[in-house]
Image (spheres, rainbow, N blue to C red):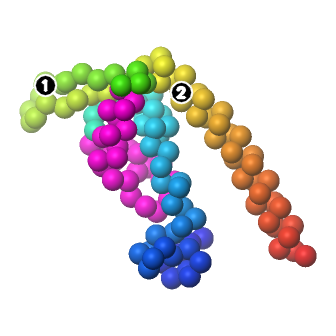
């Protein structure tokens, strides 16, 4: 696996693995999965999304909030303000029927990609043994 000293996976000496650079995304499916489980608010979602890492790169909280706004505009999630309890009001998000359908599509797509990745790794393994 990549590490900070691997000369093949170190981008510009910043300790960021180029192999993982595109995997840190997948914000939308991870948020939909979390919201499918239960209604939640931004900070809690940020904590939860880090429980499903696709790389060692931490997600920018701003990217999560931008994704939430975008997903709400698309009708994948809805939100309402929760003013109960102590402390500031929190915007609670929940997944919609459209969001459930999108999550299903993500799962189908990821299963296909998983097969393709496994095939790629197997082909590499065969070449490596030659």
- Residue 120 in the image, given as x and y percentages of width and height: 77, 57
The number of numbered badges drawn on the structure is 2
* Residue 45 to residue 51: above or below: above
- Provide the residue designation for mark 1: 83
Q: Residue at x 79, y 53 (%)?
A: 119
Between residue 51 and residue 76, name the one nearer to us. Answer: 76
Q: Residue 50's spot in the image, x, y percent?
A: 40, 51
Q: Residue 43 is drawn in which quadrant?
A: top left
* In-image side of 11 versus 106 (left or right): left
Q: Is residue 103 left or right of residue 40?
A: right
Is residue 106 within the magenta segment?
Answer: no
Q: Position of residue 62 (x, y in %)?
A: 29, 47
**CA neighbours of label 1 inside 10 A, class few (<14), some (14 to 19), many (20+):** few
Q: Main secondary structure of the magenta part?
A: helix
Residue for badge 2? 102
Q: Secondary structure at mark 1?
A: loop
Nearer to us: label 1 or label 2: 2
Magenta segment: 43-72
As drawn, the residue found furthest toward the top would be 97
Q: Residue at x 58, y 34 (%)?
A: 106
80 up-or-down from 107: above or below: above
> x, y (%) of residue 25?
47, 49
Residue 89's image quarter? Answer: top left
Q: Is residue 70 magenta?
A: yes
Mark yes or no: residue 79 visible.
yes
């Amino acid at each position: 696996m990549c590490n900070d000293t691997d000369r093949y996976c170190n981008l510009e000496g910043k300790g960021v693995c180029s192999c993982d650079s595109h995997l840190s995304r997948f914000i939308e499916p991870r948020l939909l999965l979390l919201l499918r489980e239960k209604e939640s608010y931004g900070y809690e979602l940020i904590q939860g999304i880090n429980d499903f890492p696709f790389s060692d790169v931490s997600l920018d909280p701003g990217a999560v909030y931008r994704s939430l706004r975008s997903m709400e505009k698309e009708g994948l999630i809805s939100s309402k303000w929760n003013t109960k309890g102590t402390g500031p009001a929190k915007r609670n998000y929940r997944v919609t029927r459209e969001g459930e359908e999108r999550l299903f599509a993500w799962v189908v797509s990821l299963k296909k990609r998983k097969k393709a990745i496994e095939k790629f790794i197997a082909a590499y393994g065969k070449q490596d043994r030659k």
